[in-house]
Amino acid sequence: MLNCIDASCFVRKFQIFSQEIPSDVTVQAGGAKFSLHKFPLASKCGYIRKLVAEAQDADLSMIDLSDIPGGAEAFELAAKFCYGINFEVSTTNIAMLRCAAEYLQMTEDYANANLVSRVEAYINEVVPKNLSSAVSVLHFCENLLPMAEDLNIVSRCIEVVASKTSKESWVGSSGRVDNQGSASSLNYQIKPVIDWWLEEIVVLRIDFFQRVLIAMKGKGLKHGTVGAALMFYAQKSLRGLDIFGTSRKKIEHEEEQGQRILVETIASLLPTEKNSISVSFLCWLLRTAIYLETTVACKLELEQMIGLQLEQATLDDLLIPSVSHSGDTYYAVDSMERIVVNFIEQEKHCDLETLYVCGPNDHFSPAFTDFIKVANLLENYLAEIAPDKNLSIAKFTGLADLIPEKARTVDDGIYRAIDIYLKAHPSLNELERKKVCSIMDCQKLSREACAHAAQNERLPVQIVVQVLYFEQQRLRNEVSGTLMGREGGCQSQKINNSAATSSVHSPRNEFIVLQQENQDLKLEIARLRMQLSDLEKDRPCMKFGMGRPPQYNKKFLNSVSRKLGKLNPFMKLPDSTIQPKPAKERRHSIS
């Protein structure tokens, strides 16, 4: 095989016949100059023959071939062929030699067994034999466009590559992409698929890789194999890109443009079928697209694909920095909102009322389980982004309102996110804090969350009152259920008792008493709210969101708690089986 010609050499001499015969023409090709002879060149090169014939000056001493495909290296091989010097032809130089021969018009019209026919014979014989040869020729065609395309070298190589990879993939590809994997384990997941052929085609430029993959799809390549190939190619091509930094690093314009085109092309090639590619990889690719500022269409397409399998994502997958101008949120909240909307849109045909259909083992349906997973994921996401100073109330509450109420069985996660947000934004006024808390359902808080909320000085007073009311109501319902259960267990004994005693202590009478006391409790809560409204009117300058609340607020809350405790009718029951819970040390913050 010939070594590459040193482009720094500007004068080259071929003394083929004899040192006594001086050169009569200088050829400039690809930045190099060759001192040659007209006769051997014109005898096989139609292009040079025409130049010599058309020259008015018989003493033509300079020929400019600066635009010859393959440059100086390709012309040197063609010149050696004209002089009858033997050289080795391989997959690394066959493409440029074919293009140079076409450029110089070295066809059968000017000499028998000319360079064009000889090179074509080699291509037709060697390229279809194996994958490596076809990929090698195709790779060296990247710098020979558009002539390599016009001569059908590219299309022939793509056909060979697609045929061989598709045929072998049906036989040897047994690996599948694990959709639960994280971005750090992608290499392990796709290893069974890439051992034999993807390592070969990964050297191709993205436009050629795209054409090869499209041809492979046309031959029936499986979606999982297509996804694995794209994952591997993206990781290899974008290996040096730091997308996990806190700031955007400066990249050369040409390099950045090439990476941007690569990401956009890969996104357009991704299979649209659900679970055909890892959601962790999709999130990684979206992170890269945001970092490189690709087109809006590219990012929207990736967001839609992530939404199709959002229940498989992890919190780390979705914490994507916005990497945008100053004043914006640290994380790409708008992107996350669109992802959740896409998830809900795909499930909109499923009525949430029917998602509770249970099987023989009383399990929720798969669709409802996905909603539960996404709801928990979104609660954790809100808690992570809550400390962002630039996160507006509208974005915070808008993201929380996306998940249907029926999918949020417990609101402890929402309460935690609210508490973190209020702590990170102490300048909010009373109305703004009420709006933030509006995304929480106080009836869905656990006892631990209620105990914390009752002493949380960052919450509006009305929210604290609601928490206390619903907790008191829950206690009443629990005790009522216990008493009615006890009544049912002793029913046979009460039948033997006197009618008067039975009527006094019957469950129905107990229930009527509880109803009356519940009404009294509601009236007391209404009265307390009116007192609270009067206090706010008397002190218009009072600010609840700035620093520590005034002292009388705590007294008022203590008063509310004492009044609600007095209204508890079950404290009067003698010999109650309900033991008072020991006092717990309460935290003042869960953030």
Image (cartoon, rainbow, N blue to C red):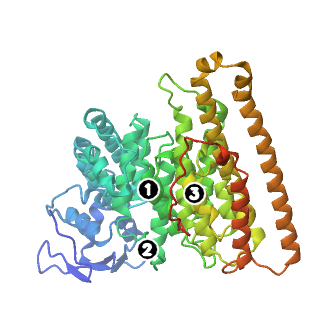
Whichever of callouts 1 and 2 sits on the residue coming sooner in the sequence is: 1
Tag nearer the camera, 1 or 2? 2
Foreground of the two, 523 or 420 = 523
Amino acid carrying label 1: it is Asp
Whichever of callouts 3 and 2 sits on the residue coming sooner in the sequence is: 2
74 left or right of 211? Answer: left
Residue 483 falls in image quadrant: top right
Residue located beneath label 1 in the image: 207
Query: Is residue 117 among what the camera can see?
Result: no
Whichever of callouts 1 and 3 sits on the residue coming sooner in the sequence is: 1
Residue at 28% of width from left, 38% of height from top? 173
Residue located beneath label 2 in the image: 245
Instruction: State the SS at label 3.
Output: helix
Amino acid carrying label 2: it is Gly
Residue 376, given in percent of the width and then of the height, sits at: 53, 50
Residue 555, given in percent of the width and then of the height, sits at: 71, 72
Residue 3, given in percent of the width and then of the height, sits at: 17, 69
On-image quarter of the N terminus: bottom left
Tag nearer the camera, 3 or 2? 3
Q: Which mark is residue 449?
A: 3
Foreground of the two, 487 or 587 = 487
Foreground of the two, 329 or 579 = 579
Residue at 62% of width from left, 62% of height from top? 453
When the figure is inspected, residue 258 is found, relative to residue 497, above or below; the finding is below
Distance in Å between CA atoms under marks 1 and 3: 56 Å
Distance in Å between CA atoms under marks 3 and 2: 36 Å
Residue 269, given in percent of the width and then of the height, sits at: 48, 48
Mark 1 nearby-residue class (10 Å; few <14, some 14–19, many ≥20): few
